[in-house]
Image (cartoon, helix red, strand yellow):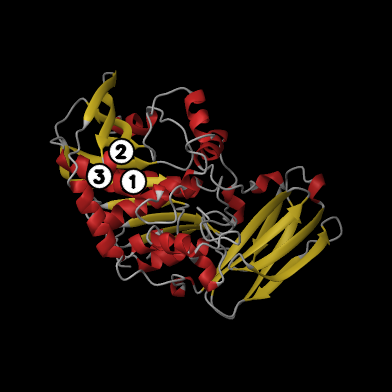
């Protein structure tokens, strides 16, 4: 396992373009960007990693940005995002307060600072290699998914390609293919014009109801990849904004909860199977090089990347930024729940809690043997670090971690995307991305 750590001084020095990209990409959850408060939060271990029994101390200062609205603050420190260990108030015009806690077991701490209706987070991981899933994998998990893949295999792909764009460097198409129970998979496909065989890349999407811009596929095709970008829903990818807004407010409103009282009816069933079918489709194409299938995505797309590699051994590497859907049964271990929040205070239906176990990213991660690049923030309240770490710890392949102590769900990806770019180059050229053993 390799780890790349990014301290708080470097997280928010992003170019405007990168910031806008991340604002667009990670729309699930309601984390506020740290720059809205403009505070500098530092801790004893700049990497945010500690051993059991260590003292964790944060120091809070007014930052270089206009923070007049954040001079008086409230704060909480929670164990595993749930149990309050410490809370208080401070006047930043008088002093730079320090907040200290000691953890007695492997897990996570999250410091949240409040000023008005805004907040800023920082986190810490304790004995991170010892963090375990909140529940064991269901004994019939693999059997269930084997049966669902078999059900999908009985359905012909019936792939349809509609030509869309051609320029001097690439061809692209809108693609549809069939999956279980009369449903379809929708996306965009692109490949270079020159050449006969190409390494392949599958891009999976963050949460929400929207179409796909052509760049999701063509940007990688320009660099020599056979590139497939699919959407999470059974809807066309090239409609106008009003079309998607209407779906968001009607049939796809709260889509993550549709059918979640049963593993056979959950909205996630088709979504997960679509990831594996997309990999299978790539592997059937005569222009695939027969060696490389990389899967990547952020947030919900990171979740789907883990699912794809867990279901389909043809995947040769994954790159997941702030992967959602990890440790959906977290409250069993006194951890705060992560997206899609099936297991919450308001949710008491045992059927939903049981369904969650069959769609938990951790349980797919057990089957991952390929290299994985995973980025996450220790202040993320949507894709919580403790759950992400539990998923990483059960992976059987080599892993490289990009950990950002002050990173929240949005706006903390610069370091990760630098490494993702490097991984793409290495994988494209058939090189080993992680030469060290896990």
Residue of label 2: 183
Residue 297: tell me if it is visible: yes
Observer-side mark, 1 or 3, equals 1
Earlier sequence position, callout 1 versus callout 3: 1
Between 68 and 148, the residue placed more toward the observer is 148
Classify mark 3: helix, strand or loop: helix
Residue of label 1: 270
Instruction: Tell whether 102 sits left or right of 359.
Output: right
* Residue drawn 50% across the image and 25% down it: 241
> Residue 165 location, x and y as percent?
30, 20
Residue of label 3: 277
* Residue drawn 55% across the image and 79% down it: 105
- Marks 2/1 in contact by CB < 8 Å: the verdict is yes
Between 129 and 366, the residue placed more toward the observer is 366
Q: How many labels does the image show?
A: 3
Quick one: quadrant of the N terminus?
bottom left
């Amino acid at each position: 396992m390799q780890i790349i750590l990014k301290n708080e001084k470097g997280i928010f020095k992003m170019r405007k373009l990168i910031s806008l990209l991340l604002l667009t990409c990670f729309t699930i959850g309601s984390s506020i960007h740290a720059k809205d408060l403009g505070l500098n939060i530092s801790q004893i271990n700049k990497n945010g990693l500690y051993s059991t029994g260590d003292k964790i101390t944060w120091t809070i200062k007014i930052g270089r940005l206009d923070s007049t609205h954040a001079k008086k603050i409230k704060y909480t420190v929670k164990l595993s995002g749930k149990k309050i260990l410490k809370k208080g108030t401070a006047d930043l015009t008088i002093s730079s307060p320090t907040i200290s806690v000691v953890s007695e077991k492997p897990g996570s701490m999250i410091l949240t600072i409040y000023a008005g209706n805004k907040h800023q987070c920082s986190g810490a991981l304790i004995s991170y290699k010892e963090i375990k899933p909140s529940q064991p994998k269901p004994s019939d998990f693999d059997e269930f998914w084997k049966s669902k893949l078999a059900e999908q295999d009985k359905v012909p792909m019936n792939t349809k390609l509609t030509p869309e764009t051609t320029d001097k460097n690439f061809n692209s198409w809108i693609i549809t293919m069939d999956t279980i129970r009369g449903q379809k998979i929708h996306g965009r496909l692109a490949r270079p014009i020159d050449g006969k065989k190409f390494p392949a890349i599958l891009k999976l999407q963050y949460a929400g109801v929207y179409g796909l811009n052509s760049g999701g596929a063509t940007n990688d095709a320009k660099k020599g990849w056979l590139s497939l970008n699919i959407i999470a829903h059974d809807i066309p990818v090239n409609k106008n904004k009003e079309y998607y807004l209407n779906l968001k407010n009607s049939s796809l409103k709260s889509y993550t909860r549709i059918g979640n009282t049963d593993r056979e009816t959950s909205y996630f069933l088709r979504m997960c199977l679509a990831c594996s079918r997309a990999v299978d489709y790539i592997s059937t194409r005569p222009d695939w090089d027969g060696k490389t299938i990389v899967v990547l995505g952020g947030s919900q797309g990171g979740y789907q990347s883990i699912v794809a590699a867990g279901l389909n051994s043809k995947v040769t590497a994954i790159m997941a930024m702030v992967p959602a859907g990890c440790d959906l049964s977290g409250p069993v271990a006194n951890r705060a729940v992560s997206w899609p929040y099936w297991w919450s205070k308001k949710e008491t239906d045992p059927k939903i809690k049981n369904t969650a176990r069959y769609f938990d990213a951790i349980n797919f991660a057990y089957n991952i043997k390929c290299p994985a690049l995973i980025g996450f923030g220790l202040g993320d309240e949507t894709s919580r670090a403790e759950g992400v770490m539990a998923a990483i710890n059960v992976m059987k392949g080599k892993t490289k971690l990009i950990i950002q102590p002050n990173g929240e769900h949005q706006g903390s990806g610069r370091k990760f995307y630098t490494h993702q770019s490097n991984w793409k180059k290495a994988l494209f050229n058939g090189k080993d991305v992680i030469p060290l053993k896990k």
